Image: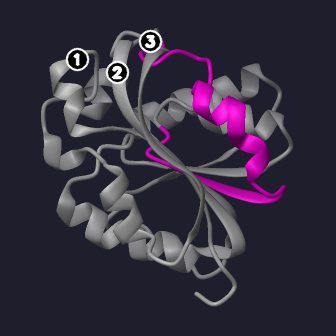
Amino acid sequence: MWDERYDTETYVYGKTANTFLVDHFRAIPQGRVLSIAEGEGRNAVFLARQGYAVTAVDGSAVGLEKAGKLARENGVTIESIHADLASFDFGEQQWDGIVSIFCPMPSALKAVVFPKIIKGLKPCGMFLLEAYTPEQLEYGTGGGKDTDAMMTKAILSRALHGFNFHRLQEVEREVVEGAYHTGLASVVQAIAAKPNNI
């Protein structure tokens, strides 16, 4: 599905970074950042332009090829890894930040990925996420129709138990990100720090 979606000259989610990330990236310590489900590269390229060493992981080789092209257009370098999140090794205490922007994550995948996020972050490393909530179905402005793949404050609180949340809120906001994410939307936003004792 994703290879087909990305197989066009157009950047289907645009070339501009997610506005929540743009507004809050400074919460992430300078260093190594992993961007999961990165797609066509807009967020990874933005972070690289801010001086981060960025690794972009995605299940679509077509999307990552476009990410590399976007990086070259912007005069930056990103590392791209073609992998399924379920099997991708996040490593242990590897990352100063992990970023997840509109990554559809069914329950079975959440159960696998969040422990890897916890393990992969360095102490005091930051996790930054924006995702659609199940209420997004009422808006119909992106995110598909599978509520199980969406996110809530409660899910994040449980999945990152013990983390220090700098922000955790469900809000209604205008999302303008290419052909598939445009219009008033229901989202959850999180910025959370991994404590030293986890």
Q: Which residues are magenta?
A: 11-38
Mark 3 is on which residue type?
Gly
Residue furthest out toward the bottom: 197
92 vs 161, left or right, is: right
Mark 1 is on which residue type?
Tyr
Q: Quadrant of the C terminus?
A: bottom right
50 vs 55, left or right, is: right
Residue 113 position within the rendered picture, expressed as x and y whole percent measured from the top left = 37, 67
Query: Which callout, 3 or 1, points to the residue nearer the camera?
Result: 1
> What is the basis of the colouring in this image?
one colour
Give the residue displayed 20% in from the left and 54% down from the top: 106
169 vs 183, left or right, is: right
197 vs 130, left or right, is: right
Q: Which residue is at the front of the view, 24 or 177?
A: 24
Q: Identify residue for label 3.
A: 178
In the rendered structure, are the residues bearing label 2 and label 1 in contact, judged by CB atoms less than 8 Å apart?
yes
What is the CA distance from the residue labelled 3 to the residue labelled 1? 16 Å
Q: Of the residues under marks 2 and 3, which one precedes in the sequence?
A: 3
Question: What secondary structure is marked by label 3?
Answer: loop
Q: Which residue is at the front of the view, 8 or 31?
A: 31
Q: Identify residue for label 2.
A: 185
131 to 8, vertically: above or below: below
Mark 2 is on which residue type?
Ala
Q: Quadrant of the N terminus?
A: top left
Residue 187 position within the rendered picture, expressed as x and y whole percent measured from the top left = 38, 33
